[in-house]
Image (tube, rainbow, N blue to C red):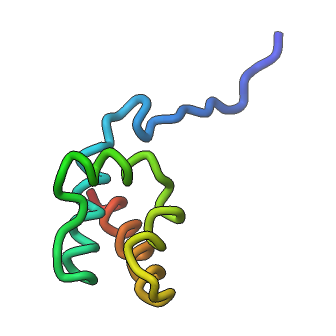
Amino acid sequence: MSRRRAVLLDWDGTLVDTREALLRSYQEVTTALLGAPFPVTEHDRSWILPLRGADSFPLLSDDPLVVRALAEGFHAAYLRL
């Protein structure tokens, strides 16, 4: 009989509803860096939430330094929330 050494679970959005934490993370970082929260409308949420962060941040700014700051700030906020 073999013993399992590890079990991998996809908790983010599968076992735990992380939608609110994702939204708050986006809104915190965009308010801090862009001066206004995003996403606000259901339309905005419907196109940004399915994207990976790496794909979404360049859509919010053309400045590579701002894109990097968005990514770093988002991840920090998401881990905290």
User: Where residue 47 sits: x, y (%)?
Assistant: 37, 49
Please report the residue visible at 36 percent of the width from the left and 68 percent of the height from the top: 74
User: Depth check: 12 or 46 in front?
Assistant: 46
Query: To which quarter of the image does residue 44 belong?
Result: bottom left
Please report the residue visible at 43 percent of the width from the left and 69 percent of the height from the top: 59
In the image, residue 9 sits, relative to residue 62, either above or below, namely above
Please report the residue visible at 18 percent of the width from the left and 52 percent of the height from the top: 41
In the image, residue 70 sits, relative to residue 10, either above or below, namely below
Please report the residue visible at 24 percent of the width from the left and 59 percent of the height from the top: 39
Residue at the extreme front of the image, as rendered: 43
Residue at the extreme right of the image, as rendered: 1
In the image, residue 78 sits, relative to residue 49, either above or below, namely below
Residue at the extreme top of the image, as rendered: 1
User: Depth check: 18 or 66 in front?
Assistant: 66
User: Where residue 2 sits: x, y (%)?
Assistant: 82, 16
Q: How many marks?
A: 0
User: Where residue 45 sits: x, y (%)?
Assistant: 28, 50
User: Image quadrant for the C terminus?
Assistant: bottom left
- Left or right: 10 with respect to 34? right
User: Where residue 58 sits: x, y (%)?
Assistant: 48, 73
In the image, residue 48 sits, relative to residue 66, either above or below, namely above
Query: To which quarter of the image does residue 33 belong?
Result: bottom left
- Left or right: 25 with respect to 61? left
User: Image quadrant for the N terminus?
Assistant: top right
